Amino acid sequence: MKKNILIVGAGAVGTVVAHKCAQNGDRFGAVCLSSKSLRKCEAVLRSIERRGYPRARACRLVAREVDARDTRALIQLIVETQADIVINVCTAFVNMSVIEACLATGAAYLDTAVHEDPAVLNAPYPWYANFEWKRREDFARRGLTAILGVGFDPGVVNAYCAYAQRYELDTVTSIDIMDVNDGSHGRFFSTNFDPEINLREVIEDAGCLEDGEWRTYPHHSRTTTFDFPEVGRKKLYLMGHDEVHSLSVNVPDVKTVRFWMGFDDHYLNCLNVFEQVGLLNHREVTTASGQAVVPLHVLKACLPNPASLAATYTGKTCIGALVSGKRDGEDREVFLYNVCDHEAAYADVGSQAIAFTAGVPPVAAALLVASGPWDCETMANVEELDPVPFLKLLKELGLPTILRRPTTAGFDEELVLFDDAVPPSDAPSRRPGIDAPGSLSPRKTSAHP
Amino acid sequence: MKKNILIVGAGAVGTVVAHKCAQNGDRFGAVCLSSKSLRKCEAVLRSIERRGYPRARACRLVAREVDARDTRALIQLIVETQADIVINVCTAFVNMSVIEACLATGAAYLDTAVHEDPAVLNAPYPWYANFEWKRREDFARRGLTAILGVGFDPGVVNAYCAYAQRYELDTVTSIDIMDVNDGSHGRFFSTNFDPEINLREVIEDAGCLEDGEWRTYPHHSRTTTFDFPEVGRKKLYLMGHDEVHSLSVNVPDVKTVRFWMGFDDHYLNCLNVFEQVGLLNHREVTTASGQAVVPLHVLKACLPNPASLAATYTGKTCIGALVSGKRDGEDREVFLYNVCDHEAAYADVGSQAIAFTAGVPPVAAALLVASGPWDCETMANVEELDPVPFLKLLKELGLPTILRRPTTAGFDEELVLFDDAVPPSDAPSRRPGIDAPGSLSPRKTSAHP
C-alpha cells in the first residue's frame, strides 16, 4: 500500500518537495501540497504539470489551504487526505502545531528546521529540548515516527556524521559543518530561503560545543577559511545552527561540534545595515500614522521571493561535514560533502540549489519511512538513523555524497559514495553489527593540502 | 501691536522655532505651537519652560493639535489664535493646505521647504512652479506676504546670493551652494531631519542649471571637493535642492546654479542598501500576513528621531554660497557662509545644528515681516528680499555670516558681516538705490588656496 504524503508549506522548499514527490509519483499514493495560500499551492501544481514528469501521473496531486498554526485544521486535513506522512516545510514557527496534529492522527512527522518562538532569539541549548524533544516520549509511546531536521543542514550533514562515525572512524572527537553558497542570484540582496527565518538565524549568537563545553560567541565574530572542493577557498563564520544542538548530544564522546557558513562582504554589509537600523526586529514599531508593524515583515516584503531567484541563479553550493577523530589509534579527518549546481537544480525541479538541497532530503526520508528502513517508531534526529539507505537514495534523487579521506600514501582520495558503476567496496564497518556501506567509487585524487 | 505667531509642526525644526520665539518672546504677541500630536507640542513647551528664557514670559505660549492637511482646521486655528504670521515647518507634503488657510484668513505665510507630492519623485523644474508659485498672484492681489523657503538652505543661502549680487559683484554668473555636516551623532545611521523628506531628496535626480541649461544627473553621480572653513576639505555630491529652483529663475543672467552636499561613505552605503532593497519606496508593499505598508514609513519608524540626536551631537556644520561673476570687469568669487556648532546649538535651544540652522531663519523672517522690512505683500523667495536686515538679525539670533573674498593683494580675507564691534564699512552698494550693507569686521586672513 503506497503512502499518502501531506506537504505543509508551499514556499521555495515546499515547491522542491512537491516536485520531487511528483517525479517519484509511482512511489507514493496521494500527495497533498498545503499552505495558507491555496493560490501558491495551485501554482506549484501547475508548474509540476508543465514539467510533465513521466511518473507524476502515478500519484494523485492535490492542493489545500491550511493555517499551519491551527492544529485542529491540520488534524482535519490529515484525516481528509489520509496522510501517512507529513512533511513540514512551513516556517519554523509552526512545528509544534504540526507535531500535535501528527500525534493526534498517527501520521509520521518530518521537518527540516527546529521549532522557533518568534519572540525569542538565542534560545537555550540544546534547541531541540525547548520544544520537539518534549514530545519524544509521546512519539515513542505511540510507536510513531518523527524525524527532525531532515533537510540538508540539518539533515544530510547529520547523516554524513553518522556515516563517518560508523565507517571511517573509531571515535569522533570533532565535527565542523561547512556550508558555502558560491552561487550568484544577480539581485542586490536576497536570502535564499524565508528571510524571516534566515535573517533571524544569522544574527543569533553563534553557539557551539568546543572542548566539551557549550560556548557562545557574538554572531560573525569568529571566522575561519576552508578550501572547498569545486568552489575553492572561502571565508566562513561560526553560526548557531540546528544540527549542532543534536549532534553534540547524540554523537558519543564528541568534544567539538561547530557550524560554519560562508558569507560574502556584501551580504554582511547589508545584514549589518539591516540589523543596526532595527529592520531585523520582530517587535512591532509604530509608524508616524499609528500603524503597528514588524520591521522584519516589511523587509521580507521588500526582498525578492527566494523562489523567484531560481531561473537565473548560477554557481554551486558546497555543504559538508568535516569529521575528525581516531582510527586504529591514529588521528584521521574525513570530509563528506555534496556539491549542488544551481542551474542543474533548476533544470531538475525549477528551483535553486539552496531550496533543492533542503527539499530533496525530506522526500528521501519520506520514502524510507514509507518503505520501512527509517520508520523508527519514535522521534529521532537524522544521526540516530542508518545513513546508508538515506545517502543511497539521495544520490538517486540528485544529491550524491563525496567522501574525501586521507590515504596511507599521504594523499587525499575522493570517492563517490554508493556509485553503482563500481563493485561494492569491502570497507569494513567500524561498528559491530553494522554492514559495510556499499559501493565506493574513486572520484579523483588530490594532493594533500 | 505685537504679532501673533502660529507654528505648524513640532518636529526638530518646529522645536527650534518655538524655542527661538520664546527667547524673543518680548517681540511677539502670542505664539502657538501646533502639530498633529498635542503631546509633542506640550513636551516642547515644557522644554521651553525648563530652560527659563528670560524673555519667554513676555509672550503667551500655547499648544494646539491640528492636522495640517486639513485647511478648514487650519483656518479655524488661525482664527482662534489670531495668528498674524504662520510659520510652516511641518512636513513638505502639507504646504499647500497651509497656504490655502493663510489666503483664506489673511495671515502671512513662511515655510522652509518646497511643497512635495509624496507620490512624485523628480518633479518638473522649477519645483516652486508646480505648487506655490501658482498662488503667487493670489498673494499679490491680496497684498499678503508669503516667504518661501526661509530656512537655511533654501533660505539663508539665497540671502547670501542676494548679498553677493548687491554688494560684491556686478554680475553673477555662477552659484554653488555648499552644505556639509561635519558633525557626529554617534548613532549607526540617522537623518538629521524627517527621514521621509531627507531620504527622498537624496535619491532624487540631481537637477541643476549649468551653462544656462537645466540638466539632471543620477543622484550621487557627480562629485566635487571643497575646502570648507573650519571643517576642512570634504567630498560633495551634486543634489537637487529647492534653492536651485528659485535662484536659477530669480538671479538675472546667472548661468550655473548647483547644490552640493557632503556625504560620508557610511551614509551613502546605508542609503544604497535602503534604496536597492526598496526601503525608500513610497508605494505600499504587502506583508505575508496581508498588511499594506509603505516601506519608507517603517524605515522612518526604525530610525532615530532626529530631535533625539541633539544631546550628544558634536562637530559643526558649514553651509554657504560660493558665488562668482564679474566686478569691474574682473572675475571674482566670494563665499558667504555660516559655521554652526552642534553643541553650541544644543546649549542655546536644546537642538542639533541642522535643526538650529533650519529653525532660526524663519523666526528672523517672522520678526522682519512683523516689523515691516520683509512684509513684502506678495509671495517671494528669499533672494528677492533685502538680505541685510535678515543677515543682521540672524547674527543676533546665533547664525553669523562670514564673507570670504579675494583681496587685491592676492589673499582671501574673511569678514564677519555686521559685526557691531567695528564701525560700518564704507563698501558701496553694487546696485543703484541700495544702501551700503553695514559693518564688516575683518575676521582672519588666509592664504589664497
Image: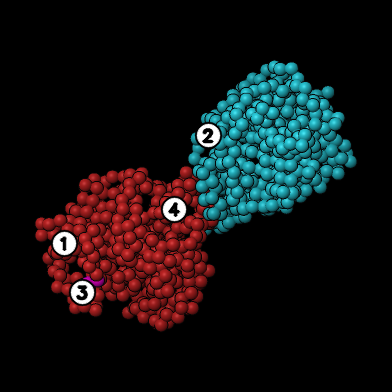
Chain colours: A cyan, B red
Contact between labelled residues 4 and 1, with CB atoms less than 8 Å apart: no
Task: Identify the mark nearer the N-term, 3 or 1.
Answer: 1
In the visual, does A208 lie left or right of B222? right
| Residue B439's disc number | 3
Q: Mark 4 sits on what residue?
A: B267
Q: Position of residue B122 (x, y in %)?
A: 37, 47
- Label 3, label 4: how many angstroms apart (C-alpha)? 40 Å
Q: Nearer the viewer, mark 2 or mark 3?
A: 2
SS at mark 2 in the image: loop
Contact between labelled residues 2 and 1, with CB atoms less than 8 Å apart: no
Q: Point out the stretch of residues depicted in magenta.
A: B438-443
Q: Residue furthest front?
A: A409
Residue B440 colored magenta? Answer: yes
Pick whichever, B139 or A4, lies toward us. Answer: A4
Name above or below for residue B46 compared with residue B404: below
Pick whichever, B341 or B368, lies toward us. Answer: B341
Q: Nearer the viewer, mark 3 or mark 1?
A: 1
Q: Quadrant of residue A408?
A: top right
Tell me the chain of label 3.
B
Q: Position of residue A169 (x, y in %)?
A: 76, 34
Q: Mark 2 sits on what residue?
A: A184
Q: Mark 1 sits on what residue?
A: B410
